[in-house]
Image (cartoon, helix red, strand yellow):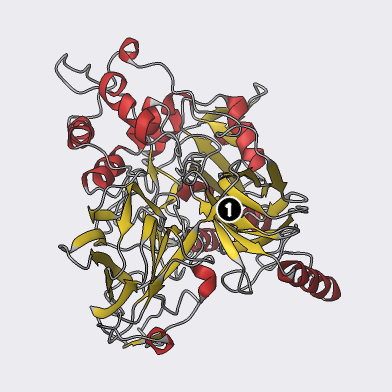
Amino acid sequence: MRWFYPVAIACLACWSLANVGQAVDKEPSQAKLGQKIPNLSFQDADGKTLSLYDLKDQKAIVIVFLSFECPVSTSYCDPLAAMQKDLGKHVRFIGVTTNLDETEGQVAKQAREFKIPFPVFRDDKLTAADALKADVTPECFVLDSDYVLRYRGRIDNSYAERLKKNAQITEQNLEQALGEILSGRPVKTPATLPIGCPILREQKAAPKASEVTYHRDVLPILQNHCQQCHRPGEVGPFSLLTYRQAVNWADDIKLYTKDRLMPPWKLTEGARFHNDRRLADKDIATLVNWVDKGCAEGDSKDAPPQKEFPQGWQLGTPDLVLSMPDDFQLAASGKDLFRCMVLPTNLPEDQYVNAVEIRAGNPRVVHHVLLFIDAEGKGKKLELDQKQKTLKEKELHAGGAPGDVGPGYTVGMGIGFQPQGGMGGWAPGSMPRYLPKGAGYVLPKKADVIMQVHYHRDGRAEKDRTQIGLYFSKEKANKPFQNGTMAGSAGGGTGPLRLFFSIPAGAERHHLQGDSWATQDFTMHTISPHMHMIGKEIAVTMTPPEGATQKLFTIKEWDYNWQETYIFKEPIAVKAGTKFHLDAYYDNSAKNPHNPSNPPKAVFFGEQTFNEMCFVFIGGLSERVGRGLPMSGTPPKKE
């Protein structure tokens, strides 16, 4: 498993909004059911008008409220398109958006990008939303041939709560309702609870001078802590640039900042780190107060200037730019894809890489990137073998979903072989940093860089061409940036057998632990924990030969989607004989919503996400020859 330790396991995803959104025990609205809907009119970007009562020959009409800013809504673009294709002869679909910040032209453009085959209109003044009592996007309303509302609610039961998907889809509510109407039967379930993003109504009362307002108090916090990811073209699944967008996600902003789940920072205690993104207590109190008091907008004159985000290479022009040879085309729907790109360096001599900057070509779908060094050409062989296999089978997709086309190769996990080193990675919010002066990742001449890209899909076909900028050390004398590994096991222990643990089915708090010792002095710069899906807690302490034990980090709520490399604010001098101790806990019970097995099964050590691991990777500098830090899982002998 040595291929893991040189890399920054940096899985900073978009918001994983579990346990938020509509409450599952809320009753679905019955408003307007059995009533004839008035003659609504819609106007497109060309000024053409469509009136509801013009659709005389349809057996059913579906009005679906959509939002191109709501990831729940956009995830239904493909299913709705498929339904239109199957039922279009008898059913008319109409899309409606309620975002008043958009123009009719912008709505039409986004509908084309998401390949929606039916017309989508902007609901100016929320006329349609008010007439149907619509509250959520996506929310659909089915009218019969007499324009009487027969069904209102969700499309299916994909979601348990906002952005929290069910393991399986067991109810196709919209499709079932249409089938009953088309066959002349009564709709068995005329109302279901839609799950998604709220439709915003105008604020009625002006805020008092003493109240917290968006423009004066909230916007500066969002600019400095949220907008780097939550803006168009970036990885955040929604934007937080405008007042309406902030109100749309206000409940989530309050919940996630109050519980310190956003901005993402999993550590609860330990050393000080460079990339600490936690909000100050006063900022959290401001956001909570704003939401609790009704999300007052305030005066736009109080707003700070618009935040300008840096463009281009952050560290200046790189010494070498590596790029994918062609665009990778990612299909609109399917499972997440891990794609390995082979990037030849063609270097005539060895180099020390002092900094790496990764520019995601399409941050909307690039979840994270990891970099590995291949000095033996194994990646090229895997890419060629997979290309020949897919051509032989006449399958042009890239090992993921049909429609995934482009360079690289796909393996089950990792990169398919043991690399000769790593060069860190990128995740949303990561900023490039130079390694210590006179240090660098060793990049052999003619080596390839294997760039593993984790793609997640956003409901439309996307293209990506991610680039890497390498900055070579200008020093005459250099040291290799080295890595060390700690591993956990059921009984602690030493040697390679400590890796081969098992976690019993049903165990709610299974303990793994491990120890490692510094065999020589070294300087510690980074630390990165790694577990899989059922990990719950992980912590590491350090005890010098003559000194008190100190906590390096503690994570109380482990999340596989939120892993990263932590950079110490001040490098830590580690003395020979220092003991590192690792404690980790796993929940393999049915109570764990992240458990990939239902019912739970015994989980063994392995690379797949349904297996488990327990590692902590340390990065730093030492006088030891080679690329590994002087660390050992065997305690030093007493003299």
Name the side, left or right, on which 407 lies relative to 441.
right
Report the front residue among 479 and 488. 479
Q: Total number of numbered labels? A: 1
Amino acid under disc 1: Leu
Which quadrant is the C terminus positioned in?
bottom left
Q: Nearer the viewer, residue 321 or 179?
A: 321
Residue 16: image location, x then y, percent: 39, 54
Q: Examine the image and state in which quarter residue 301 appears.
A: top left
Q: Is 565 situated left or right of 215 in this image? A: right
Local secondary structure at mark 1? helix
Q: Which residue is mark 1?
A: 80
Residue 532 visible in the current orientation: no
The answer to whether 15 is drawn above or below residue 529 in the figure is: above
Residue displayed at 23% across by 55% down: 270
- Judge the density around disc 1: few (<14), some (14-19), many (≥20) Cα neighbours within 10 Å: some
Where residue 272 appears, as percent x and y from the top left, is 27, 47
